Image (tube, rainbow, N blue to C red):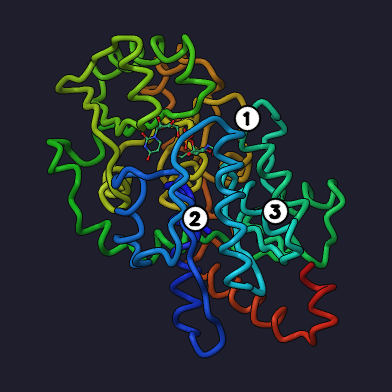
Amino acid sequence: MVGTRPNMMKIAPIAAELGRRADEFEHVLVHTGQHYDREMSEIFLEELGVGEPDYSLGVGSGSHAQQTAAVMERLEPVLLEAEPDVVLVPGDVNSTLAAALTAAKLLLPIGHVEAGLRSFDRTMPEEINRIVADQFSRLLFIHSPEARDNLLAEGCPEAGIHDVGNTMIDSLVAMRDRIDAAAAPEKHGLSAGEYLVVTLHRPALVDGPLLAEAMSQLAALSEALPIVFPVHPRTRAALEALAIDLDRDRLKLLDPIGYVEFLSLVASSAGVLTDSGGIQEETTYLGLPCFTLRSNTERPVTVSMGTNTLLGLDPARIAEVPSLLEAARKKEARIPPLWDGKASERIAEVLASALDEPVEQLGQALG
Ligand code: UD1
């Protein structure tokens, strides 16, 4: 199942691996349509080589309840028809929650890719989605050490936890040559190592008064450091509602861009300012400074081991980015264990042995 932009990078390498082992696995890809603009959706499936989904549910936008209900209503007949042995759900978006609930009600075993992440902040919709998906999943695929502790603390059985590594990093490794060849900075008139990439899209930041402050801080910062900011549709709508139009030579506001172009911009940047989850991981893998404009992170390994710095939900701190960049360059950072491009292979191995179990044990192992 995929629903949103970040889901694509988490599932694409698993789909590719299952495809390579077609004598053992048959897989069906369901796209809920939570994201539907080409730049938020199809472009990723194309670039990552996944191809057309087998089912497109076309749920689109709506309130949390509407979106969740629409996915459940439309996914149920698909699962009844496909009769899968396992339903794989990635990440923490509304489609993840809805797919997990639907499969759980049909007594279908669930595998959660990116299990165990916790911000411990239930005002984040994603936190609720993660907790529910993990509670109903019997295969919990984790990619950082604290995920195991979080799952055990919530009573998830240890036998279901599989430390497989990070499938989002699998996508990055698989696409690395294309990313390096894309030369996106030149296309946008930017010099390698001399600009900041910005992404902001979370409701806590963009759906309230903090957005205007963040934009004026970015405008001031761009005098010292050019900025490129691909703008999420949610953020674009908020900027329009506030009548903020700051697009200028040194603060470039772009429409959403594809995976290869985005990571090409990131890979050659001086650093990234973001409120995204996945970008904290990608920058840690690339060894690039990341400044996270949030009060917490469900990905603490990117701070303790990687290149991430939590700034808090405080746009005033954007002014500190030049000095923080200096400090970040001196920080010793490492790539977390198993973020090596092989997570999908490990997931396929776990699936193969789980599916090999005799039917009565499969029930215990999976659901
Ligand atoms: C969703 C996820 C969030 C994830 C983000 C990645 C939830 C609760 N949130 O947030 O965790 O970080 O995806 O992007 O699931 N829109 C478009 N075109 C699209 C998609 C959205 O214009 O293709 C606009 C619509 O106005 C929509 C709004 O963006 O109402 C928000 O979309 P939605 O999918 O509800 O949440 P995101 O903010 O994208």
Q: Is residue 144 above or below residue 359?
A: above
Q: Which mark is residue 124?
A: 1
Q: Which mark is residue 145?
A: 3
Q: Position of residue 44 (x, y in %)?
A: 34, 55
Residue 282 in sight here: no
Give the secondary structure at mark 1. Answer: loop
Gap between marks 2 and 1 measured at Cα = 20 Å
Q: Which mark is residue 2?
A: 2
Q: For the residue carrying disc 2, how many other residues have a C-alpha within 10 Å: few (<14), some (14-19), or many (20+)?
A: many
N-term-proximal mark, 3 vs 1: 1
Observer-side mark, 2 or 1, equals: 2
Residue 235 in sight here: yes
Q: Can you tell me which quadrant of the image ligand 1 is in?
A: top left
Q: Is residue 125 above or below residue 319?
A: below
Gap between marks 3 and 1 measured at Cα = 22 Å
Q: Which mark is residue 303?
A: none
